Amino acid sequence: MPEQATPPQPLAPAVVILAAGQGTRMKSAKPKVLHEIAGRSLLAHAVAAAQQLDPRAITVVVRHDRDAVAGHALELDPGIIIADQDEVPGTGRAAQAAMAALDGAFASAAAGQGQAEGPVVITASDVPLLDGATLAGVLEQHRASGAAVTLLSTLLDNPTGYGRVVRAADGSVTGIVEEKDATDEQRAIKEINASIYVVDADILRAGLATLTKSAVTGELYLTDIVGYANKAGLSVNGVIIPDPLTVEGCNDKATLAKLGAELNRRLINKWMLSGVNVIDPATTWVDVTVELAPDVTLEPGVQLRGDTSVAKNATVGPDSTLTDVSVGEGASVTRTHATGAVIGAHAEVGPFTYLRPGTVLGEKGKIGAYCETKNANIGANSKVPHLSYAGDVTIGTGANLGAGTIIANYDGVNKHKTKIGNEVRIGSDSIIVAPVSIGDGAYTAAGSVITEDLPAGALGVGRAHQHNSPGWTAKRRAGTPAAQAASAATKATTS
Ligand code: UD1
Ligand code: MG
């Protein structure tokens, strides 16, 4: 072991994320690690955990669906180093590719510090519940124990399929045996290898150089690093994670759903403990990226996705799906499907309301039942209460759109903009044909088709005058119940 002359700061780790496996059991055209739970891909969960270690470098090992996986990794973090695994299979080969790709990161660090290289944290790309705090704890234990290799394990009632952790009488880890290579006695071991390791870089490099292909599978096993360390007289520390789900890998869609539900349960629990009222945790789903303030209430059947935030005392639900929506303090959002919208403080939305991107509703505004909005900037205290469509429109403050108002923004080829001023009253069932501008305090008559600008304070009437034909029902619908009713009414008023 190199002499570690009490460095002022522990050396930052490099993180290796293994993502070159095929993921055939997902039975999907989409690469396994791009499947999502809680609004993040499996790979993004691994990267987020890695980032919390403040690493010197993160490398993602790719092979199957190489471009899709590498492209996604670089979207998550452009600083990620992509390591390409060749046709030689196995986790050991993947680690070799990672160390080759990391050479630059270690070389510059070593040149700068003139000392040991520090630890490498190796994780899988399909262990979405492994959080940064757990990983940081293991790294801490690795440093404190002085072990050359630290591996994560857990205890499973049914360990079938996993590598088993073999320990000596004194508890030290002597090896990992894959299921197919295990003796009956070893198969009875319930402690399994989680495939997450911390290894000092120089030891990892030396150990990887000794790997030989399995006679059974032709794979290079990363797990053989444990045997190498033992032979070299280096200590191996096995950290048992008490909750198996934290280190459970995701191989098929049933497990994806199970881990998704568990992660959601953990997120909801965290929010409830921070003061959010969740009426029915089982039907409430939140992405990891969502922000909720204390005294928010989430009614049953709510899904909050992406960059959604809800300010204090606001209520969302029941039965609402909000994606990238900001909900202001004290607002209420009921049975609503909304994307890319901003809902002001104390505003009301719903029920049965569809907010599309670019909707901005001012303080104390309202978008009510059976309304759809898109690119609609609706000022404070303005209301679109019933059965309306408002697209590509700016509405001032204190305005009211009557029931059934349509802002006709599309001429079949192009979209046009509408401007509606402060304190405007749009009569029920008006069609406002864009582009058009309606001045402050103007009114439109119910049933109008407004095609021309309306000055401030004017009444716009855009409909035919009503013409009555007396006695029409008796003449043209003689003998019908309508004619009888009309006749009775006429007699009553003339007698
Ligand atoms: C591996 C471990 C086993 C452990 C299990 C936990 C080995 C030899 N065995 O088993 O002890 O109990 O994980 O789930 O390591 N990968 C690559 N390149 C490859 C093969 C795999 O990058 O050539 C990646 C996969 O994308 C995945 C991870 O390595 O993220 C683990 O691979 P997987 O095939 O799921 O693990 P097993 O070989 O079943
Ligand atoms: Mg495998």
Image (cartoon, grey):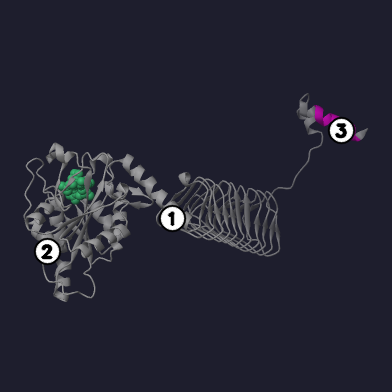
Number of numbered markers: 3
Identify whether 422 is placed above or below 189: below
> Is residue 491 magenta-colored?
yes
Q: Which residues are magenta?
A: 484-493
Which quarter of the figure has residue 84?
bottom left
Mark 2 and mark 1: Cα distance apart in space: 39 Å
Q: Which residue is mark 2?
A: 202
Identify whether 211 is placed above or below 13: above
Residue lying furthest top: 479
Mark number for residue 490? 3
The one of 466 and 59 positioned closer to us in this rendering: 59
Q: Amino acid at mark 1?
A: Lys
Q: How many residues crowd mark 1 within 10 Å: few (<14), some (14–19), many (20+)?
A: few
Instruction: Specify whether residue 31 is in view.
Output: no
Q: Are marks 2 and 3 in contact (CB under 8 Å)?
A: no
The one of 246 and 34 positioned closer to us in this rendering: 246
Residue 106 % position (x, y): 16, 68
Q: Residue at x 59, y 58 (%)?
A: 347
Mark number for residue 270? 1
